[in-house]
Every structure is written in C-alpha cells, then in structure tokens.
Amino acid sequence: MYEQIQGEVLFIMFYGAAAMLSLTACCYLLFRDGNAFIADVTSPIRLRRWVAALFASMFLSHVWYMPTYYLSSNEDIMLSAIVGAVLDFMMLIPLAIVVLLVMLQDRRRPLWPVFMMMVPLIIGLAVCGVSRSDALLPMFYIYYLLLAIGFIIYIVRATRQYGRWLRENFADLEHKEVWQSFMILAIILLIFFFYAFESQSPANKYVTQLNNIILVCLLLWRVETLSVLSIPVNDAEEEALTTENVDDNALPLSIRSSIGLLLQKHCIDKQLYLQHDLNLLQLAKVIGTNRLYLSQYFSSQGTTYNEYINHLRIDFFISLYHKAVATHRHYTAQQLAIESGFRSYNTFMRVFKQRMGQNVRKWMDETGQNCSNQQ
C-alpha cells in the first residue's frame, strides 16, 4: 500500500513537471523578445506563436487528464478519455502538425486542411461519448493511421523541396536547415501519439510524460536556432520560381553569357562570395539582373547557387593555403576556412570533401609534402 502511494506521488510530481515545463516554455516564447540560446539568431515570429499555442494546448491537456487517473468507474474513465481525445484532436494534434509545416519557410502552406482532416475524428469520438460506446473506435484508429502515413509522405516531400529552395537561394545554410531535427521531431511526435492511444499502464504513463518533456525541449531548441528567412519578390517571379520543372533552355544564350561575365566582374573579381549570408536576390541586384534569370543560369550550369558560392570559397581557401605555405605563415585549417567565407567549419569540411574528393587534413598533408619536395 505504501509503495503504491509512493509511486502515485512520484508520478504526480513527474506529471506536474511536464505540465509546468509546457507552460513555462509557452510563456517564454510569448513574452521574451531575445534569444536565450543563440543571441545573433532571430527566429520566425510566426513559428514562435504557433509553438507557443502548441505548448499551451499540451498544458491544458495535462490539466484535463490529471483527474482521469483517479477515476474508478470504467464508464467514467472511457467517457473522460473520449472527451480528452476530442480536445486533443481539436487542438494538440493539429497544432503539432501545423508547427512542422510552419518550420518550412520556402512558402506559406495552407493550414486549414490540417484542422479539416480532424473533423471526422472529432465527430466520431463525440458520437462515441454520447452513446457511451467504443464500438467505432477501431475505425478511428485506421483513419488516424492513414492520416499519419499520408502526413509523413507529404512532409518528407515538402522538406526535400525546402532543402532544394535553401540551396538555390542561400550561400550559408547555418541555422536554416531543418532536416535532421525535423525527422527527430516527427519520430517523437509519432511515439507520443502512439502512447496517447495505448492503455495507461504505469510504464506507458511515464514514457508518455517523458516524450512530452523531450518534445518541449526539442521544439524550444529548434525554434530558437532557426533563422527567419525572407526573400521579397513579386508575385509573377515567385510563381515562376516555384514551378517544379524550370526549362533551362528558356534562358536565351545571350543572357546566359552576359550573366557569366557579370558574375566574373562583380562576384569573383570583387570576392563578393566572401560575404556572409549573401542570398540569390542580393547577388542578382549587385550584378544587375533578376532572381529568375540568375536561378535559371545556375540551373543551366548544372549547379545551385549554394554550390557555386561554396566552390568559389574552396578555391579561395586553396589559394590562401598555398600563400600561407609559401610565406611560412602560421595557420590552421579552421582559420583559413573562416577567412574564405565559411561560418561553420563543419560545413567547410563537408563542402571541401565534396569538391576535392578527400578530407581537408589529408589534402593539406599531401599538398604540403608536394610543396616540400618541390623546394
């Protein structure tokens, strides 16, 4: 008896900690202007508000389910669980999906279909609550499973599109990509939803709350480390750029040649590629063309804007390295990478290996030995 009471008290404390963490994170996102994680990163206001709404719904869900752990009647437990599920499908689950969509900043995707997809579940669960019968629940499980599979397929495709948009428009991808954290977040959400449908055994109860805590921490970190991205363009240009299959041959040869000369004059000769966070639109304005033509130019060359800028930076790194060796200057690979325009050494190492076919340490050793032999 004593051990049972002690276990209940421990769970209440754990449950309460998860609830208060959600509430605290919600207040932080709503009322704090600065970034407590990375001071120089400004996160999207729209994303902060949606995540704050999700945290608020998680807190309210905790408040609702707290009394259900102490109900003794099976009928009361079923009714309370059904009402809780209705509330979750009205707020918690659609908000979680919306947050994942809002993270992708390549375009504003419509959010109302997310809430509309929950309507059959809400109506069906309401019918179960009124009739006090769970006979229809298997149908809802199947519908929910199909929704989950469909959403996973859609979000993977949308994330790939977002990654392609980043590479086509930004030279530096630090604090912009969402792939790894997004997939981790999606997995945690699926685990959370799985346990939400399972029987509340002691183990499942603790795992559910643990998932809540991990979810809040991961979301808070992701929001605060994701930079706000904005490339203002007119509607006609945006429509052309968002077309999946751009005809490379649509760019006249004369314009293609002139863009190549302009890039040489304004980007390469003036070493504009060393500038941090230089995006495609800014480069287009500097060289005197528009974003659509410049995007089509890189596509016609079989590359992306990100690859073009980073390849120039690698070439600059190589020239810096040879100068440093020739003048016997003290250097480190990281120092030379920063001087070459890279903000992240990890990004530099990845790009260098893609360009040169070997890691930078091995290349420097081999190149240094060749230089010594020539001398």
Image: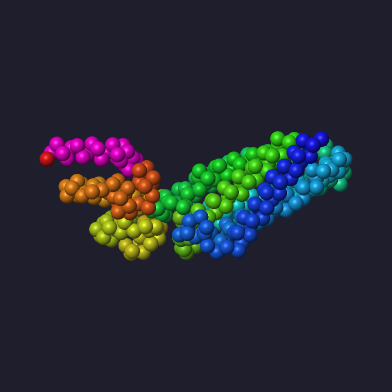
Q: Residue furthest front?
A: 2
Which image quadrant: the C terminus? Answer: top left
Does residue 248 lie above or below 363 as drawn?
A: below
Measured from the top left, where is residue 174 in percent x and y? 43, 51
Q: Nearer the viewer, residue 30 or 331?
A: 331
Residue shown at 30%/50% (left/top)? 335
Q: In which quarter of the image is the N terminus?
A: top right
Identify the coloring: rainbow
- The magenta region covers 352-374
What residue is shown at x 32% (from left), y 62% (from top)? 287
Q: Residue at x 54, y 51 (%)?
A: 221
Q: Does the magenta stretch include residue 309?
A: no
Task: List the single residue furthest toward the left.
Answer: 375
Q: Is residue 364 within the magenta segment?
A: yes
In the image, taking residue 6 as reference, residue 162 lies left or right, namely: left
**Residue at 71% over, 49% down:** 16
Q: Which of 338 and 276 is in front in this view?
A: 338
